[in-house]
Amino acid sequence: MQDKYLPADIERAAQQHWDSTEAFRVTADASKPKYYCLSMFPYPSGKLHMGHVRNYTIGDVLSRFHKMKGFNVLQPMGWDAFGLPAENAAIKNRVPPAKWTYDNIAYMKQQLKSLGFAIDWRRELATCTPEYYKWNQWIFLRMLEKGVAERKTQVVNWDPVDQTVLANEQVIDGRGWRTGAVVEKREIPGYYLKITDYADELLGDLDELSGWPERVKLMQANWIGKSTGVRFAFQHDIAGDDGQSINDGKLWVFTTRADTIMGVTFCAVAAEHPLALHAAKGNAELAAFIEKCKHGSVMEADMATMEKEGLPTGLFVTHPLTGKQVEVWVGNYVLMSYGDGAVMGVPAHDERDFAFAKKYNLPIEQVVAVGDKAYSLDAWQEWYGSKDGVCVNSGKYDGLGYDAAVDAIATDLAAQGIGEKKVQWRLRDWGISRQRYWGCPIPIIHCDSCGAVPVPDDQLPVVLPEDCVPDGSGNPLHKREDFLNVACPCCGKPARRETDTMDTFVDSSWYYARYATTFGKDKMVDGETDYWMTVDQYIGGIEHAILHLLYSRFWTKVMRDLGLVSYREPFAHLLTQGMVLNNAFFHKPEGGGKNYYWESEIDIQKDAKGQITGARLKQDGTVLEHELTTMSKSKNNGVDPQSLIEQYGADTARFFMMFAAPPEQTLEWSDAGVEGAYRFLRRVWSFGHLFASEIRGQIG
Ligand code: ANZ
Ligand code: ZN
């Protein structure tokens, strides 16, 4: 044992020993308790960042701790390897996404190895390999058979200049990211997974996840969004072009506040609603407004804050309980995709309706009173939306509280056959079709005679050609005759392959189950899965709190229903690690925004406690502002793990990460802290050396 602490030598020797002895290779062993420790697999973007290092160090510490306690520990690693950045890199550098991805994987794997994690590399997987995505295709076909997957039309972002479909993140302020052209909405067919069929179970089983942070469970519950209310119709005889009453003469609405039904002063429908489209036929102003709404956001967060706008349709419907005529408006705050795409407007008790009524001078009628608070029309206040009041100005319902009023009103509507209580979910079915090249091909063949035909199992996987170079003008698969042309599996006539690929969330929805198999070529998962699953500890970023975790939970339940696995939830404990923060230094240029500088470009002044008191740009001496914020490429404040490893060794990096902050909390980067960690490890080494050479010698 050498007396000096030389991390590069020590770590290399240890890592070679682990490699040659396959120290972290594990197999199912029923005689031992198991511990499956999983960190969210990285996207192979080029190189590791500090967030990865933190994530994987936490997992590694837990894994090694459990191994020392006698558990059979599985800690795997792999690559979330499909997705848009590879296509963007291809456009920029003219290299195929496959090459870019595999090169990045090779580099990042070396980085992970140099960090010394106790990973069973034999189980490494990359989602862009046919061995992996074959099973995406296979289970998709099972879902089609079961009716869990179905084909229907979807609305996509269309760039009219590039003639291509854009992902949401490629639309910036309503324009295409490359062309700057105003993006249009288009309806095209695509595949959907019926996650809504599992809404009840996905919500209910959250109660079983005692190892999950409450915050994440709440986010999931809100996303699933169970609302209990009443669905009912306003009747009318508005005839469409065919002379028949539109929608059978019923304008359906969903409300969570049926107790306010006597306060309805208008109805509002979404821009895409049949009544809106009908009214627009003879009304150019309305037609233009509807067009404008179509370009607007459908994000609910935006809907809540945006300026309420609308136009009257000139159409009237009948209030089911008062018989009064109620005018129908088109409102930009009504979503076509929620409930029935229409609302009863109760401005006295709903904030959005209030803003709308104020703007367009529509009547506001109080129908709920809370205590003896006086109602005022000057502002919409918190209690107007409260369910704690009693009905007033509501005829026979006066004096009833929320529950009693809803019951009575639902009963009266049901008696007319135009209403009932209803549970409404916010969750939508999961559209998985992406008009992108770098993803898992959807295994469908289009035949002029037979329609959309599933690829037979014995022709799987449908292999994605790996040598395409996207140029931004649409999916390059459209030009690949060798991929496109195929015989129809039904009738044998010439047919064409589907060119859409799957949402990359599909890839990450079941990778944890694949790690826990023997990687057999003939099965998606095998018996080993039931030994290792469920994951005992899952670790990753809070940015995945909703979609990735929800899709994985859904996927698990589908696999259970297909008889592939026996568990119903994939992750027993979840840890969402905090972000890594660092100071960022910037100028604020005249036109707005911030110009960031690297620490190497500036002189920093600090006080005795090491607090930053000022910063100047070396180049010209100008004063810079600074803020503590998440490390990021765009803010020039990232610290490269590689340089840290080279300077101090992996153990210092790992040690600093674990001691600078509790895992769930944000971690402030500190060069002094890193040096302190290094000095400590050096002392530990010297002590070990002393023990080995002298003390042991004496005992010896
Ligand atoms: C009248 C009313 C009065 C409402 C009141 C609320 C308060 P959650 O809880 O999210 O389910 N709504 C229904 N369909 C809509 C759509 N397609 N787009 C926009 N808003 C819609 O919300 C249900 C409430 O959201 C419903 O209850 C309806 O407004 C509105 F004092 O009906 B309410
Ligand atoms: Zn055919």
Image (cartoon, helix red, strand yellow):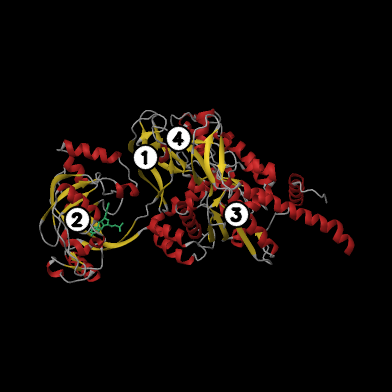
Q: Earlier in the sequence, mark 3 or mark 1?
A: 1
Q: CA distance from mark 1 to mark 4?
A: 22 Å
Which of discs 3 and 4 lies nearer the camera? The answer is 3
Answer with the quarter of the image where residue 427 lies.
Answer: bottom left
Find residue 346 and report its horizontal and vertical position in percent: 19, 57
Which of discs 4 and 2 lies nearer the camera? The answer is 2
- The circle drawn on residue 347 is 2
Q: Earlier in the sequence, mark 2 or mark 1?
A: 1
Is ligand 1 less than 8 Å from the beta carbon at label 1?
no
Q: Quadrant of ligand 1?
A: bottom left
Residue type, numbered disc 3: Ala
Identify the residue under disc 3. Answer: 660
Disc 1, disc 4: CB below 8 Å?
no
Mark 4 packing: few (<14 Cα in 10 Å), some, or many (20+)? some
> 386 left or right of 672?
left
Identify the residue under disc 4. Answer: 496
Residue type, numbered disc 2: Pro
Mark 1 packing: few (<14 Cα in 10 Å), some, or many (20+)? many
Residue type, numbered disc 1: Val
Circle 1 — which element?
strand
Is ligand 1 less than 8 Å from the beta carbon at label 2?
no
Residue type, numbered disc 4: Arg
Residue in the picture at 71% in, 53% down? 681
